[in-house]
Image (cartoon, grey):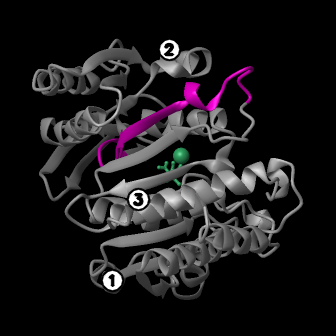
Amino acid sequence: MQHRVAAIGGDGIGPEIVAAGKEVIDAAGERFGFDIAWTDFDIGADRYLDTGELLTEDDIRELSKFPALYFGAIGDDRVKPGILEKGILLAIRFHFDQFINLRPIKLLEGVTTPLANRKPEDIDFVVVRENTEDFYVGIGSRFKGVREQKTLEVVRDLYNVKFGLDVETDADELAYQIGVVTREGAERAIRYAFDLAENRERKVTSVDKANVLSDVYGLWRDVFTDVAAGYPDVATEFNFVDAVTMWFVKNPEWFDVVVTPNMFGDIITDLGAMIQGGLGLAPGGNINPDGTSMFEPIHGSAPKYRGQDVANPLATVWAGSMLLDHLGEHEAAAAVLRAIERSILDGFVTRDMGGAKKTSEVGRYLAALVKTV
Ligand code: IPM
Ligand code: MN
């Protein structure tokens, strides 16, 4: 069996951690009888600085031929914040309608969590982050002056929305950003979370801020309630986002599946990453169940460590395990996770986890382990 996967190393430490991930995935393929045909793409800051190109029409056409993309990291200190993030990473998520951002929060055996006395069985849940809407739609404006008229549009596979705005002000300078939640957009994310919960511990927590942002998150809650009615055997709960940051720390064992709009999902998964042992261990999948999905570590590109072979590849390798799951290679996916766990128990880790190993050494070690664990 052969799978075609596109690899985008991206910026900073991205290419190094993706190289390690590919090695581990290839080794898993040797053991479990499949082969990955990798195609590398040079999308990222270097190309942008050379040619001015972010995500091009050509890229989109080529990438759309793959069921899965393996992505390193984006962000470079030579480029103003926001350009690469929006022009590449978010552009891929939106263009391919990767409406789920799946982020497991799982404490592996041998990992130290900053939460005192917590064990692996206490920290094991998943965050389903809606990935195409909310304050991430990228529409807003910033102006000086008394009046601005503007048309702002969101174009999606699922729907289009157009705002005709006429803003008058006597403020010196003004900026606004519009968040969009639709019934269709919320429903497909929430339904995904309930389907997932049916195969786990049958509990779904909605995280929002419906007490203040009551239009956008009021709609989100209504949709949650409507979807929940179709899953009578799944327990449900609402948490406000400020409170959930407290509960993640105080009672992580309460959570099973957490579903949340895009921006809160971004924020609470960095907290989730920390309680599972740090950003070096946190993977994510940007999923379109019927299209092109993308798997990546949730951390950034750490430009200052670029080329030093010191970055922790475990989050990327774990993202590789999610990629394998997505491709239907479930046994291989499980073996990759066991290899990660084994390497941690062996103390064969990079310096952020208290070890002294190089990125490439960890990759090689995991590639050997995955053939036997
Ligand atoms: C993440 C990142 C991105 C996000 C950035 C780089 C656009 O923080 O994947 O969590 O905000 O979604
Ligand atoms: Mn983030």
In the rendered structure, the answer to whether residue 182 lies left or right of residue 205 reads left
The residue identified by callout 2 is 243
Q: Residues within 10 Å of mark 1 (few under 14, many from 20)?
A: few
Residue 239, position as x, y percentages in the image: 39, 16
The part of the image, by quadrant, that contains residue 317 is: bottom right
Q: CA distance from mark 2 to mark 3?
A: 28 Å
In the rendered structure, the answer to whether residue 6 lies left or right of residue 237 reads right
CB of mark 2 within 8 Å of CB of mark 3? Answer: no
The residue identified by callout 3 is 90
* Residue at disc 3, CB closer than 8 Å to ligand 1: yes
In percent of the image, x 23 and y 66: which residue is there? 291
Tell me which numbered mark, 1 or 2, is placed earlier along the sequence: 1
Residue 97, position as x, y percentages in the image: 25, 59
The amino acid sitting under disc 1 is Met
Residue 270 visible here = yes
The amino acid sitting under disc 2 is Ala
Q: CA distance from mark 3 to mark 1?
A: 31 Å
In the rendered structure, the answer to whether residue 310 lies left or right of residue 199 reads right
Residue 110 higher or lower than 357, as above or below? above
**Looking at the figure, which quarter contains the C terminus?**
bottom right
Q: Which residues are magenta?
A: 114-140
In percent of the image, x 46 and y 44: which residue is there? 103
Q: Residues within 10 Å of mark 2 (few under 14, many from 20)?
A: few
In percent of the image, x 30 and y 73: which residue is there? 67
The residue identified by callout 1 is 1
Residue 284 higher or lower than 203, as above or below? below
- Near-viewer residue (257 or 45): 257
Residue 98, position as x, y percentages in the image: 30, 57
